[in-house]
Amino acid sequence: MSKKLLSAVCAAVLLAGCADNINSDHYSTSATGKVSTVAQCTVLSVRQVKVDNGDNSAGTLLGGVAGGVAGSTIGHGRSSHALGAIGGALIGGLVGGAAQQGLSSQTGYEYIVKLDNGQAISITQGASQPLMVGQRCLVLYGNPSRIIAQ
């Protein structure tokens, strides 16, 4: 039983660690070689934010399975094993969901910038290269869009 529990916990940790890289200096291979429109801007506002994908279902599921397996070993008799499995699954699901959220959330910045044409836009991106209010920057329109120092 302990090997099954260990496998489930390891799988939950690995899935939770698969957070997207949201930094402005990270490109996927499919994004290279593509043309983006660029506009000059000035940073008006910077706000630190937490970014997560909002889906903790994998951690909840794997935690529930691991908790159910572990809980089923509690007690003696059929009803004790069943109650232990149910309780373990509930607790494991809560812990697994919380673990995935904690492991996959990232710190980012929400930038509000004023384009040179007068339009104001906002972009949220990773915190690898923070920008300052008043700083001149470039907006790279694409998927994802980015703001980079000029």
Image (cartoon, rainbow, N blue to C red):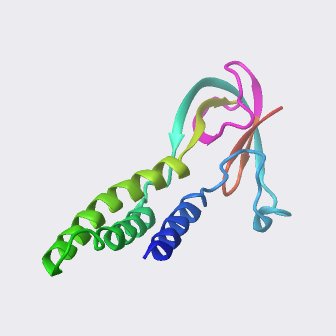
For the point 35% across and 66% down, the residue is 67
The answer to which of 20 and 77 lies nearer the viewer is 77
Magenta stretch holds residue 141: no
Task: Give coordinates of residue 130: x percent, y percent.
Answer: 71, 30
Span of residues in magenta: 116-137
For the point 73% across and 44% down, the residue is 24
Quadrant in which residue 1 is drawn: bottom left
Q: Is residue 3 above or below residue 55?
A: below
Task: Give coordinates of residue 129: x percent, y percent.
Answer: 75, 34
For the point 17% across and 70% down, the residue is 83
Magenta stretch holds residue 134: yes
Q: Is residue 124 above or below residue 47?
A: below
The quarter of the rendered structure image containing the C terminus is top right
Q: Is residue 13 above or below residue 116?
A: below
Task: Give coordinates of residue 50: x percent, y percent.
Answer: 51, 39
The answer to which of 52 and 79 lies nearer the viewer is 79
Residue at the outermost left position: 79
Compared across the picture, whether 33 is left or right of 138 comes to right
Task: Give coordinates of residue 101: x percent, y percent.
Answer: 46, 51
Compared across the picture, whether 99 is left or right of 45 comes to left
Quadrant in which residue 38 is drawn: top right
The answer to which of 91 and 26 lies nearer the viewer is 91
Residue at the outermost bottom position: 78
